[in-house]
Image (cartoon, helix red, strand yellow):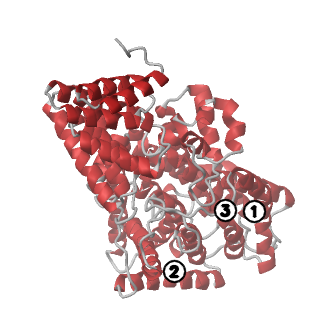
Amino acid sequence: MSVEVDAESQGGAVGIGGRFRAIAFPLVLLVAFAIGLYANTLGHEWAFDDDLVYTENPSVQAGLRGIPRLLGSDAYAHLYESMGREQELSGGRYRPLSLVTFACEVQFFGTDPRIAHAGNVLLYALTCVLLFVVLRRTGWRSRGEERRERRGEGRSVGSQLLSWPFLAALLFAVHPIHTEVVANVKGRDELLSLVFVLFATWLSLGPPRRVGARRTRGPGGIRLLAVAFVVFLALLSKEYAVTLLVLLPLAHYVFRGESVGGSLRAALPVVVALVVYLPLRLHASGFGTVEAVDLLNDPYLLATPAEEWASKIVVLLEYLRLLVWPHPLACDYGYRVFPYRTFADPVVWLSFALHAGIVLVSIGGIVRRHWIGFAAAFYLAHLSLISNLFLEIGATMGERLVYHGSAAFAMVVASVFGWGLARTRPVGVRAAAFGLTGLVVLLHSHWTLARNPDWHDDETLFIHDVQVVPESARVRTNAGRSLLARAFRLEEGRPERRALIEEAVDHLRYALSIDPEIVAAYLSLGAGLDQLGDLEGTEAAWNEARKRFPDHPILDSYDTTLVARLSARAVEAAQSGEGDAARGYLERAIRYHPDDPTLWTYLARLCAALGDSTAARNAESRARELGDGAIGR
């Protein structure tokens, strides 16, 4: 292989027009794949936290007027304020750029999910194009590509379609693990981040040198400033861009043959960007750690230290598994989706050995200035941020989290396929490579097209995914809530309405058997049991929620519901001659609305009828204090 060939200007007589014609069809094909695979998301609604960052974010809904607040506050600041809570995630979530794009969409198009989804699809297409042009800019050529170029076939459309950059970008474009990032509007964070990471790499590298050209000491001052600005935008998108502090120097060392000192100069724009970014982040979110007290935010809360480390190592293998075989997919991989592991489990050591091997490949490749070293480093750098080994991220794993790393995976697979496609002997290798490449593209495209509809809305997503990850407390809870929402849209009395509510209650109870601290599950369970006429179960569920979140805003309305149900039971009991039972119901109702004079009035009359004059006088006195005009009627 060679990195001395100017991939973007080889054959200078061809000129700019010739260079563009050489890559025009591959670019069009990549855009067609990216848009075609995700066109079926354009009619989607909001799903899985889209409301949190878009429809229920007052700063986003304010349009351009909300941008200053978005740039100066945590992404979830509005949620914490509405709940009266402090920040609950370590280090906060300062990712304002995606929110700024949402605010711009609201300003010019209104709150329209079609616009938001279209924005994601276009950004994904741009990412695929950028991956292609960045890999071309590295100047690396496989031996097969070098042979085709020596035969004068390097500029042909067929040669471009068999090139490593195109194959890598194509495999990236069709990979189903990206469905969460593209089909979920909230995935805009990852989309913008990788766009700017790739763009910064492209800018930093500059065009490859021609053979025999004088070695340079790295990018010039203007280009460094441009790179710094792009890195800053990447940091505002998501924290992944911090990896460029290592990856840009490595890219210069591997692909440009620069000295160690010259390569390190490529890190300067990242340092500049961080100097500007870190104070903004500190002001908005801080860097303090927040101790997680629930399994939703700390899936290893119940693990021993040994189990925690062993389990984290196995999760690294799960990422590789999903990259190799991305089916079926799920929106959550929280506590109990993967059982805790111990170091006696051979899977732990298999994962350790595989990743140790990737580390060795990275080191060896970098020393030899081979692209595989950079690809392995790219994967490991991003994996380090999501692995929970160095930073706690509040989740076991997530498909969106390996979005950046999947670009490196695509590079490796593309090189294997490209090797086979370039072979002429033994007979059948090239045909097999063509067949395998086509099979992967078709299979991944099918899985992508099939997975996208699951992301249509919350109901569709969670009701589907609960079949894939039945041990996820989060998915169980949301499946239950989704079934309740579906049931509540049906007329009362319809048999299917009750069946949906009963199914929802089953999901919610199972979720609480996994994690008994989920407030949302208790609230929804109470709502479901209320519709089934289980007053005691409803009251118990809502009181469990009250224990864990006494000031939850929705409890006021639920208390009103409880008072109405208890009052109705009191009336029924009184009419049936069950005075003591009626009194008990009223006293329970008063616990939820102690300042309701009407309840005290009814209690006074009931106690008087039961012959408890002392209790009657006390209740009547309390009613008068509260100003009830019903006394004495």
Left or right side of 460 for 296: right
**Residue beneath disc 2:** 358
10 Å crowding of disc 2: few (<14), some (14-19), many (20+): some
Residue at image x 32%, y 70%? 432
Mark 2 secondary-structure assignment? helix
Q: CA distance from mark 2 to mark 3?
A: 32 Å
Question: 276 or 241, which is in the foreground?
Answer: 276
* Quarter placement of the N terminus: bottom right
Asked whether, in this view, residue 614 is left or right of residue 70, the answer is left
Type of the residue with mark 3: Gly
Vertical arrangement, residue 301 with respect to residue 19, above or below: below
Residue designated by label 1: 270
For the residue carrying disc 3, how many other residues have a C-alpha within 10 Å: few (<14), some (14-19), or many (20+)?
A: few
Q: Which residue is mark 3?
A: 288
Q: Closer to the N terminus: mark 1 or mark 2?
A: 1
Q: Secondary structure at mark 1?
A: helix
Quadrant of the rendered structure where residue 574 is?
A: top left
Q: What amino acid is at disc 1?
A: Val
Instruction: Work out whether mark 2 precedes mark 3 in sequence or the reverse, and give the earlier one.
Output: 3
